[in-house]
Image (cartoon, coloured by chain):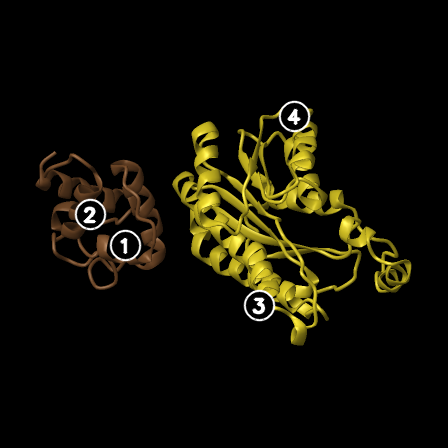
Chain colours: A brown, B yellow
Amino acid sequence: MDRNELKMQLKHLLVEGLKLDGVRPESIRDAEPIFVEGLGLDSIDALELVVLVEEKFHVVIPDEEVGKLAFASIDALADYIVRQQPGARV
Amino acid sequence: MVETRNALVTGASRGIGRATALALASAGVRVVINYARSAAEAATTAEAVSAHGVAVEVVQADVADAQAVAKMFEHVKQRWGGIDILVNNAAMTHDAVLMMLSDSGWDEVLATNLRGAFLCCRQAVRSMIAGHWGRIVNVVSPAGFLGQRGAANYAAAKGGLLSMGKSLAREVARYGITVNAVCPGFVETELVANLSSEMRERFLAQIPAERFGTPEEVAAAIAFLVSEGARYITGATLTVDGGLTMI
């Protein structure tokens, strides 16, 4: 999967998984913070996103430290997924 | 229950845990029996659960050990998928007045009774969130509300367990997950059986129902809280104590 495709998938996951009605996936910026400032999601929303990302991309986001880094932005999330999947090169 | 759910009961080899495993099995729920040390009693419980015609797994794990807990959940995931119902029942005591309480006496009780429940909750909520359904019941104690002489460690752990559960209840309610507590008073378990007759009389005098409870009576409350009908109850404490506390 190419990196842009991965990022687009993540944006769709964000919008569909969290039922962000009225947000177009393509309008989410790659470098924008996903939580607090960016899309205005609070940490309880994050729970389901963590589970969705883990299931779809077979990665583990074990705790808050890792979570904060991984969910800093769509870019950061894509980086995290690529690093966690051995053999994946995007 | 409409569909088959998977339950994990910690400390299920005897007492309230055992009765809970049986009550869930009779409701058609598959049960994982966790125990730390009592292998033979866990096997007996498993046999009794099987008699209800539901699948059963027996898993040894010290709930205070994060790695052991992770392994237990992984094992269940491989066999049955995620846990839908978690009953945090595993508990221990190490009584001493606070001034004389050792570091290890404090640490081990907090580790089993509070950290253990935290570790199990953290594992369980992931699959519950994914499935948008879950039930967690923490077994607490009047000591957690009222304090108890000679059991500051136990009381602190149970009070902590209660408020941890309420916090988690707030976090996951939107995902169809409820987190409640059951608060048994004096129940006919080994703990009560070992009391001196003088102590028994003293405790009995405080109970309006004029008798100790049974593990089955506590299990019935737990079975209700994990049922479909209890879906709108969360952050609650169901007291099962014959009127002892009325809190």
Q: Position of residue B234 (x, y in %)?
A: 55, 53
Nearer the observer, disc 4 or disc 3? 3
Circles 4 and 3: CB atoms closer than 8 Å: no
Nearer the observer, disc 2 or disc 3? 3
Q: Are marks 4 and 3 on the same chain?
A: yes
Residue B152 higher or lower than A22, as above or below: below
Residues at marks 1 and 2, CA–CA distance in whole angstroms: 9 Å
Protein chain holding label 3: B
The quadrant in which the C terminus of chain B is found is: bottom right
Q: Which residue is mark 1?
A: A66
Q: Which residue is mark 2?
A: A80
Q: Residues within 10 Å of mark 1 (few under 14, many from 20)?
A: few
Q: Which residue is mark 4?
A: B50
Circles 4 and 2: CB atoms closer than 8 Å: no
Q: Amino acid under label 3?
A: Asp
Q: Nearer the viewer, residue B106 or B237?
A: B106
Q: Which residue is mark 3?
A: B103
